[in-house]
Image (cartoon, rainbow, N blue to C red):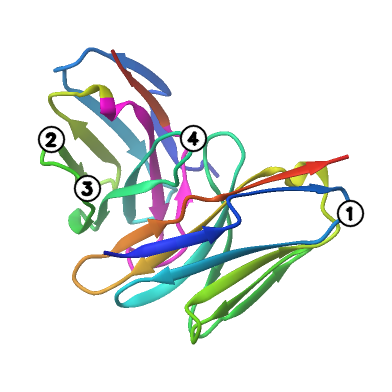
Amino acid sequence: EDKVVQSPLSLVVHEGDTVTLNCSYEVTNFRSLLWYKQEKKAPTFLFMLTSSGIEKKSGRLSSILDKKELSSILNITATQTGDSAIYLCAVWRGGSNYKLTFGKGTLLTVNP
Amino acid sequence: DAGVTQSPTHLIKTRGQHVTLRCSPISGHKSVSWYQQVLGQGPQFIFQYYEKEERGRGNFPDRFSARQFPNYSSELNVNALLLGDSALYLCASSLTGLATEAFFGQGTRLTVV
């Protein structure tokens, strides 16, 4: 059974803080790891990490994939109240049954 | 460019009824996948279709079925609805079905009473 575990489950910080969200996985036939931000309904795509692209950065957000440790981190620097959301990690498996498995998410609250 | 569109946005059904949810992918995308999300949980994978063929299936009962049409739009059907089927149903589209970025629609909120 594929498994994706995120930690912490929730986090409260002040504006300007830096946060690190964690994701570990146990997935057969790993293909890629994706990060999403979910505020109301639709998860919004942030990054995709693969064996050939283990580090991504966009503005204040960055992510690294550690294939040896089967984990990834999402960093957010200089947090803003607009960063408050649920951050979801998901992993694609390949092979005969393609499947995207999500973790439960990390609820980030950024207070002014 | 239009994103992923889902219809309807909200739906209330009675136990035992049947429901059909619809999804139109981003133009040029050939893969659609379906997810069920209950409060406090991450989305749970139901199906993936690529080029009108089922490429992946999650751990859902046979009451759940789906198909993809020649224009790459998709339907998710759920028969014999149970109270536990109440959830947000999300559709995502990908350029291909091969573990690429998946972009989500706004979802259909299904309530079973």
Going from N to C along the chain, the mark reached first, 2 or 4, is 2
Residue at x-position 29% and y-position 48%: B72
- In terms of secondary structure, where does tag 4 sit? loop
Q: Give the position of the C terminus of chain B as an image quadrant.
A: top left
Instruction: Compare residues A23 and A34 and report the one nearer the observer.
Output: A23
Q: Which residue is mark 2?
A: B63
Circle number at residue B100: none
**Between marks 3 and 4 in the image, the one whose residue lies nearer the viewer:** 4
Given the image, on which type of amino acid does mark 2 rest? Arg
- In terms of secondary structure, where does tag 3 sit? loop
User: Callout 1 environment at 10 Å: few (<14), some (14 to 19), or many (20+)?
Assistant: some
Q: Which residue is mark 3?
A: B70
Give the magenta-colored segment's residue range: B84-107
User: Callout 4 environment at 10 Å: few (<14), some (14 to 19), or many (20+)?
Assistant: many
Q: Please give left or right for residue A74 compared with residue B17 in the image.
A: right
Residue at x-position 28% and y-position 45%: B71
Instruction: Compare residues B3 and A44 and report the one nearer the observer.
Output: A44
